[in-house]
Amino acid sequence: MGEEAKKLFANAQAMLDKIIKNKWLEARGIVGFYPANTVDHDDIEVYSPGPEKGKVLCKFHSLRQQVERDQDHFVALADFIAPKETGVTDYIGLFAVSAGFRQEEICAQFEKDHDDYSIIMLKTLADRLAEAFSEQLHVEVRKSLWGYSPEENLSHADILNVKYQGIRPAPGYPSQPDHTEKRTMWDLMHVKEETGIELTESLAMNPASSVSGLYFANPHAYYFAVEEICKDQVEDYARRKGISTPEVEKWLSTILSYER
């Protein structure tokens, strides 16, 4: 607080200037949009937009709220995409961005000088730049790339307070706590091949200063938390994904309402 906070901010600004001047960090990203429909209430089929129009490319699986609360609906991300039986062609978007390329190389230089403070500062700024990249990309998605809100004119404060239409939930976060859905994203858009952003064995992203997620344009879409789920849904989810129940329980261990 106070003087220390001002000092920290000034140091960060100074390093940001160096990052820009010396090109210490490299940013890369990818974004895509695909025809999609909800099937079987909780899954989202993604279709080929090209010559093989209508061909199912993959399926995203969503989890539905089960905890009793003061609301009318138990929500899943699939609710924000038009059901297949309506005959309406809906769309889903996805993205992966990083501001962390070259970060380890620069940190190694600081390490030689035993400059731990600069290492921490660079990694922190790289994380914030990745978040800024995802925020700016979402603005461009809404206004031009997807273009469903071309007249949007929001302040930075309104953007940070999510005053815009649509959401960009990420696998592993409250609206979809399952990190394994990232594999479907990486396979569909060839993220590793196109950008170099990789998934680790634990499904973290490498470089670490990276952000990924899905885009939903539905004006009624909002962020929510799935919270605890019961064994009946875990078993159904395992069946839909074509994997074992213990495998699902491993990845969703923090939100199970029962003992494994």
Image (cartoon, grey):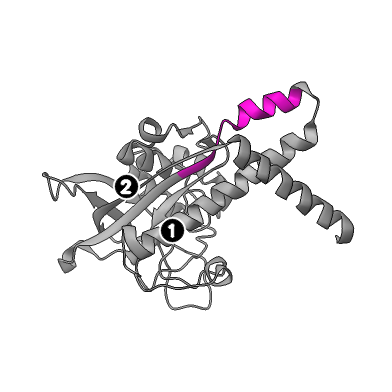
The disc placed on residue 138 is 1
Question: Tag 2: residue type?
Answer: Arg
Q: Quadrant of residue 239?
A: top left
- Residue at the far front: name it: 21
Residue 113's place in the image compared with 54, above or below, is: above
Q: Residue at x 34, y 66 (%)?
A: 80
Q: Position of residue 170 (x, y in %)?
A: 47, 52
The disc placed on residue 240 is 2
* Residues rendered magenta in the picture: 97-111
Label 1: which secondary element: helix
Q: Residue at x 15, y 46 (%)?
A: 50
Indicate whether residue 144 is drawn in magenta. no
Indicate whether residue 100 is drawn in magenta. yes
**Left or right for 205, reference 74:** right
Q: Position of residue 109 (x, y in %)?
A: 70, 24
Residue 136's place in the image compared with 68, above or below, is: above
